[in-house]
Each structure stands twice: as structure tokens, then as C-alpha cells.
């Protein structure tokens, strides 16, 4: 009788754990891929619990412990090193970087790629995007430089963009040392890193930097923090993986270095109603999105907003190096490749930015991964479906850089 009770309790616990950690993938993924993804998500959710416990016991702040746990998990799931790629670490004008070079093309004039990792400006590192950088190097035969920029909350905006700009200028000015053609350099990044790639492109143009970036590769980029009720934010508020709540948290931490007003961000009260209405027919005009993106979407009413909070943070929120979608001038920017994922809360702002770039007469290519999710690029070498989607990126870069 005692054994039966133990087995029943164990079965209930297993069922409860399975329900709690269940994380469905979009259509188009094999059973094996779904199993791998489920195991990773289970590990991720358990890490979140351990982070909460560690924070409660005083081992560090929640943010510090989550950063360590997430970076450990992401770095330990990196696939085997790509053949024909050698890497080394160094410092560019005070910024730590990791350089990836194709070993079989060291004596040619090569293209170069500056890469900025994702992680909501609060976690991630050159280790967590090691496989992405290696794959880019291998498939494009370019020298890839991955930047270890400062992160929030210790270093809120604009620390990250300052570091990425500094490292990029150094690389471009010293391209010959790395056997790189300075006229064939791209900036690239995923998620928050895509935001930084867009921001670096804008900043170097504004500063009239003498060497021009040839290509900006924006992989499901963050392009604004003004509205968390875009169709994709609501349709995919629970992920897969990236959620709407995570985005409001990341934004608060990057903008303010704290999350004291997280409820205001989550309920779109961090922006006043009058301002939100003023941009609804310009760069936040949802009618510019593909019709299929709006399917089933019911536009929420604009809340009144906290005017005191808005006045405090609007200087950063409207800064084009944080919200490139809000930039007054997007003319004369590098050619852009914008990769979005259909099952991603950030899908719509990526599209809106690509549209605005086109309206400013820039050359823009946009690719929407029909069954993609955020962060699909981090699953290369793990999910074959991710490999196929990432191949779209590397092919475009190889053909156009």
C-alpha cells in the first residue's frame, strides 16, 4: 500500500512538472526537434526556479543569478565547433571581443562582420552566440568579431551602444590588420543585438564616420519600446520562449536600470495616450503590416499613461539609438537584411522598421520565417529546422557582402 502511494505521488509530480514545463513549438518541427526543445525549456524553467531560490537565500540579486544561469545553459548547449574556423580573444579600444577567422583564407582580402549578441541587454555573452559567430564565419568566409558589451542593470542605456560603436570603429579603422576589406564590413545581431546593429548603423551615419558600413543584418530586432500591444506582442505574448512580459522587463532594465515601473510598461502606461495616438498614423501605423499579421487582432484602447513616468523616460525611449523606429531620419543607411520570425512577439516591429527603411529609399530585404520563433538562431546545430532558417541569413550575407 505504501509503495502504491509513493508511485501515485511520483506520477502526480511528473505530470505536474510536465504541465508546468510544457513549451509547444509552432508547426513544421519534427518530433525529435520538439523533444529536444522541450528538454531545453525544462532546464530553462528549472533554472528560473533556482534563481528565485538563490535570490531569496541571498546568493545575489535575481538579475545577477539569472544572468549566470542563462549564460551557463546557453553556452553548454553550443554545438561542436565549425570546421575551418579559428578564434581568439582580444581587446578593441577597451572592449573585449572574440575574433573568428576562416583558417583556409587567411591571406585574402576578406569581408568582415561585427556581431552583437542578444539577451535583452541584460544577459548573454560572446559565449552564448559562439555557434552563431562560427556559422557566420564558416558560411560567409568573413572575419567575424563578437562584442562583449556592457549590460543592464549595472550599465543601462546607452552603455551597450557606446561599447558596440567603439569596437566597430576600431575594427573598421584597423581592418587591414585583420586582412579585411574596410569597404565590405557588416554589422549584425539578434534580438537586442539586432537593435544594437541598427543603432550602430544610425550612429556612424550621424557622426559622419569616414568608412561606410556596407550591410546591416537585423535578426528579429527590437526596434521600439513604445507599444507592447502590437499584434504579434498579443498573439505570441506567451512565446515560444520569448514572452511579452520578458520584453517589458528587458526594456525597463535597459532604460532605467531597474524594474520599479514594470506594471506601467506591461500595461502600456509608460507612454501617454496623446503621444501614442500621434504616432498611430506614422511609424506605428499597423495598416502597413501584412494583412495576415492582423488576423484576429482587436486593437486595444490606448491607456491614459503615467505622464510623470513618460516625462522621465521619453528622452531615452525616443532616442533613435534605442528606438530606431522612432528616428526622424532613416536616409542614407547601409543596405538592410531584416529577418523576422512569425511566432515572435517582435515580428511586427521588425516589419515596421523594414518598411520605414524602404520609405527612406534604402535597399531592404525582409525575410519572415513562417514557422520561426524567438530565438531560433540560438538553436542551430540542435534543431535542423533552425539550421535551414539560419542558412537563409548566411546565404544572403555571403551573396551581398
Image: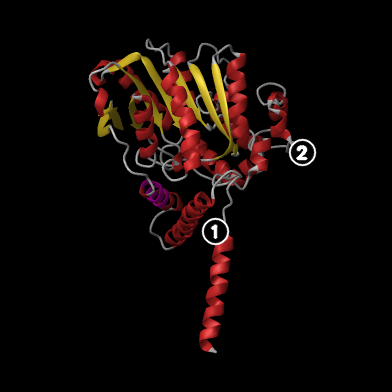
Describe residue 110's horizontal placement relative to residue 193 as left or right: left
| Region in magenta | 68-75
* Magenta span main SS: helix
Image point (45%, 43%), residue name: 379
Asked if the magenta segment contains residue 172, the reply would be no
Residue 48 numbered mark, or none = none
Residue that carries the numbered disc 1 in the rendered image: 21
Who comes first in sequence, dot 2 or dot 1? 1
- Helix, strand or loop under label 1: helix
Please state the horizontal and vertical placement of residue 10, each as a whole percent of the image.
52, 75
Residue that carries the numbered disc 2 in the rendered image: 298
Q: Nearer the viewer, residue 179 or 49?
A: 179
- Image quadrant containing the N terminus: bottom right
Q: Nearer the viewer, residue 19 or 28?
A: 28
- Image quadrant containing the C terminus: top left
Q: Is residue 397 above or below residue 311?
A: above
Amino acid at each position: 500500500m505504501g509503495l502504491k502511494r509513493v508511485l501515485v505521488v511520483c506520477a502526480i509530480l511528473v505530470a505536474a512538472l510536465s504541465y508546468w514545463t510544457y513549451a509547444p513549438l509552432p508547426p513544421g518541427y519534427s518530433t525529435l526537434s520538439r523533444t529536444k526543445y522541450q528538454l531545453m525549456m525544462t532546464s530553462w524553467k528549472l533554472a528560473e526556479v533556482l534563481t528565485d531560490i538563490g535570490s531569496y537565500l541571498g546568493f545575489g540579486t535575481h538579475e545577477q543569478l539569472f544572468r549566470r544561469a542563462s549564460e551557463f545553459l546557453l553556452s553548454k548547449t553550443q554545438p561542436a565547433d565549425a570546421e575551418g574556423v579559428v578564434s581568439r580573444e582580444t581587446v578593441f579600444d577597451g572592449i573585449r571581443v572574440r575574433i573568428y577567422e576562416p583558417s583556409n583564407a587567411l591571406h585574402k582580402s576578406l569581408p568582415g562582420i561585427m556581431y552583437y549578441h542578444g539577451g535583452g541587454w541584460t544577459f548573454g555573452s560572446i559565449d552564448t552566440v559562439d555557434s552563431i559567430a562560427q556559422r557566420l564565419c564558416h558560411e560567409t568566409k568573413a572575419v567575424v568579431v563578437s562584442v562583449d558589451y556592457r549590460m543592464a542593470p549595472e550599465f543601462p542605456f546607452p552603455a551597450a551602444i557606446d561599447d558596440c560603436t567603439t569596437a566597430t570603429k576600431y575594427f573598421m579603422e584597423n581592418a587591414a590588420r585583420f586582412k579585411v576589406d574596410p569597404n565590405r564590413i557588416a554589422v549584425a545581431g539578434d534580438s537586442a543585438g539586432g537593435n544594437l546593429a541598427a543603432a550602430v548603423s544610425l550612429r556612424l551615419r550621424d557622426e559622419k564616420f569616414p568608412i561606410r558600413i556596407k550591410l546591416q543584418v537585423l535578426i528579429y530586432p527590437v526596434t521600439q519600446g513604445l507599444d507592447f500591444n502590437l499584434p504579434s506582442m498579443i498573439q505570441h505574448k506567451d512565446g515560444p520562449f520569448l514572452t511579452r512580459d520578458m520584453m517589458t522587463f528587458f526594456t525597463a532594465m535597459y532604460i532605467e536600470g531597474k524594474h520599479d515601473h514594470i506594471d506601467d510598461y506591461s500595461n502600456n502606461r509608460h507612454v501617454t495616450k496623446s503621444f501614442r495616438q500621434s504616432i498611430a498614423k506614422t511609424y506605428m501605423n499597423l495598416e502597413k503590416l501584412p494583412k495576415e499579421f492582423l488576423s484576429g487582432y482587436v486593437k486595444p484602447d490606448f491607456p491614459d499613461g503615467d505622464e510623470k513616468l513618460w516625462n522621465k523616460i521619453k528622452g531615452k525611449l525616443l532616442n533613435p539609438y534605442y528606438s530606431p523606429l522612432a528616428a526622424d531620419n532613416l536616409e542614407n543607411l547601409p543596405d538592410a537584411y531584416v529577418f523576422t520570425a512569425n511566432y515572435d512577439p517582435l515580428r511586427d516591429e521588425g516589419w515596421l522598421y523594414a518598411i520605414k527603411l524602404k520609405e527612406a529609399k534604402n535597399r531592404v530585404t525582409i525575410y519572415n520565417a513562417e514557422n520561426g520563433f524567438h530565438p531560433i538562431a540560438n538553436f542551430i546545430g540542435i534543431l535542423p529546422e533552425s539550421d535551414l532558417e539560419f542558412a537563409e541569413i548566411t546565404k544572403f550575407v555571403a551573396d551581398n557582402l
